[in-house]
């Protein structure tokens, strides 16, 4: 979708929106997969409702991209523009046991920032790639920690009302890799309440999680983390591994030989390759274990 060909550019500029024409989403996603579209950088939170009204009036479909670390984007020319919050110098501040963080902030950066202020609890999240907004939406978790446990307030753009709203943590459901946010809610800022812990102790916890992660996950390859959610009481990675599927491929999409629930782009994989691999593995697991694996990765395909 080329917004650059529509007569809204000037108005968007006035609203503090920066237009980047013809961006390849393969450069914006950790999988290195994705077609081309225009990108809109929303530099002023307060104008978001107005920007959204403008896009609706002009019938310009959009999707919001966070860190791009848990998304599989379609190939070719994409039928929607991508909206993005600027990631340079996102706001982060601490007041007592509360941390106020912009959704565009890097998740790991937030964990370290809080640690430096002697606020802990989130050590397990240190190596989870992505933005704070994406982590909130998915309720990212690892090593027994999930971000939802610490959320006290979320400021978001609510598409249903067309307004920026503040939602209390108690009114949000945080389940395993799932939340009660509406699919079109846009995370803007979060207030977390964190336990006090000496920096050194937090650092030690962070080190342990980093070592565990390095030992079991393909951190230097292009992936979107785990492709499937774990079924209740089971492990998708273990099942795929037991089927001898490490290294199994569809084109350049490959089951990691390090962790079988990580599918990697081993070269120039397309979205179509990755989808073929996902369906193939899902079918095999279903046939052999009677379990229908559910995607954890979010698919952006029309
Ligand atoms: N296992 C294998 N072979 C493999 C992978 C795993 O046998 O190829 C076995 C492991 O030996 C272990 C069990 O399966 O006994 C579970 O493996 P692991 O500890 O790696 O945890 P996981 O259940 O596969 C989950 C999350 C990860 C998170 C880790 C650590 C999901 C889908 N995955 O993985 O999150 O980092 O625990 O807490 O919930 C993600 O969400 O993208 C993700 C990577």
Image (tube, rainbow, N blue to C red):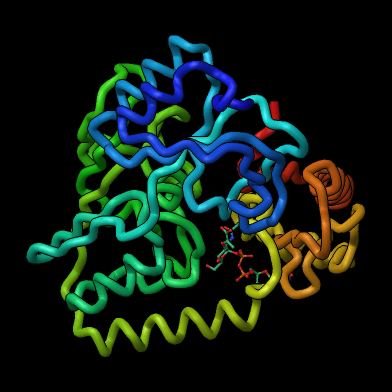
Assign ligand 1 to one image quadrant.
bottom right
* x and y, in percent, of residue 4 in the image: 56, 27
Any part of residue 123 in sight: yes
Q: Is residue 290 visible?
A: no
Could you tell me residue 104's position as x and y percent?
A: 37, 51
Which one is nearer the viewer's eye here, 127 or 63? 63
Q: Is residue 33 left or right of residue 110?
A: right
**151 versus 155 height, above or below:** below
Give the residue at x 90% y 62%. Answer: 248
- The residue at 32%/74% (across/down) is 112
In the rendered image, the quadrant that contains the C terminus is top right
Q: Considering depth in this image, is 89 or 16 the residue closer to the camera?
A: 16
Image quarter of residue 239: bottom right
Q: Quadrant of residue 23?
A: top right
Where is residue 182, by image quadrant? Answer: top left
Q: Which quadrant is home to the N terminus?
A: top right
């Amino acid at each position: 979708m080329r917004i650059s060909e529509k007569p809204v550019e000037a108005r968007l500029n006035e609203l503090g929106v920066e237009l980047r024409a013809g961006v390849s989403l393969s450069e914006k996603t950790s999988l290195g997969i994705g077609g081309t579209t225009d990108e809109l950088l929303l530099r002023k939170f307060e104008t978001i409702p107005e920007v959204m009204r403008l896009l609706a009036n002009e019938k310009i479909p959009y999707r919001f991209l966070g860190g791009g670390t848990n998304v599989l984007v379609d190939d070719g020319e994409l039928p929607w523009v991508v909206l993005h919050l600027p990631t340079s110098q996102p706001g982060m501040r601490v007041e007592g046991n509360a941390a106020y963080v912009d959704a565009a902030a890097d998740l790991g950066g937030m964990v370290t920032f809080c640690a430096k202020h002697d606020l802990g609890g989130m050590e397990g999240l240190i190596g989870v790639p992505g933005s704070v907004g994406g982590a909130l939406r998915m309720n990212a978790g690892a090593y027994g920690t999930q971000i939802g446990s610490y959320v006290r307030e979320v400021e978001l753009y609510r598409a249903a009302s067309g307004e920026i709203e503040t939602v209390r943590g108690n009114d949000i459901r945080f389940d395993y890799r799932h939340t009660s946010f509406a699919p079109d809610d846009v995370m803007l800022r979060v207030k977390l309440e964190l336990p006090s812990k000496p920096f050194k102790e937090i650092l030690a916890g962070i080190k342990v999680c980093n070592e565990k992660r390095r030992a079991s996950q393909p951190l230097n390859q292009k992936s979107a983390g785990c492709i499937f959610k774990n079924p209740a009481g089971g492990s998708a990675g273990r099942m795929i591994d037991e089927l001898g599927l490490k290294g199994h491929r569809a084109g350049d999409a490959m089951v990691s030989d390090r962790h079988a629930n990580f599918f990697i782009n081993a070269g120039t994989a397309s979205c179509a390759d990755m989808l073929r691999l996902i369906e193939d593995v899902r079918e095999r697991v279903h046939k052999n274990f009677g379990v229908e694996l559910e995607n954890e990765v979010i698919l952006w395909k029309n």
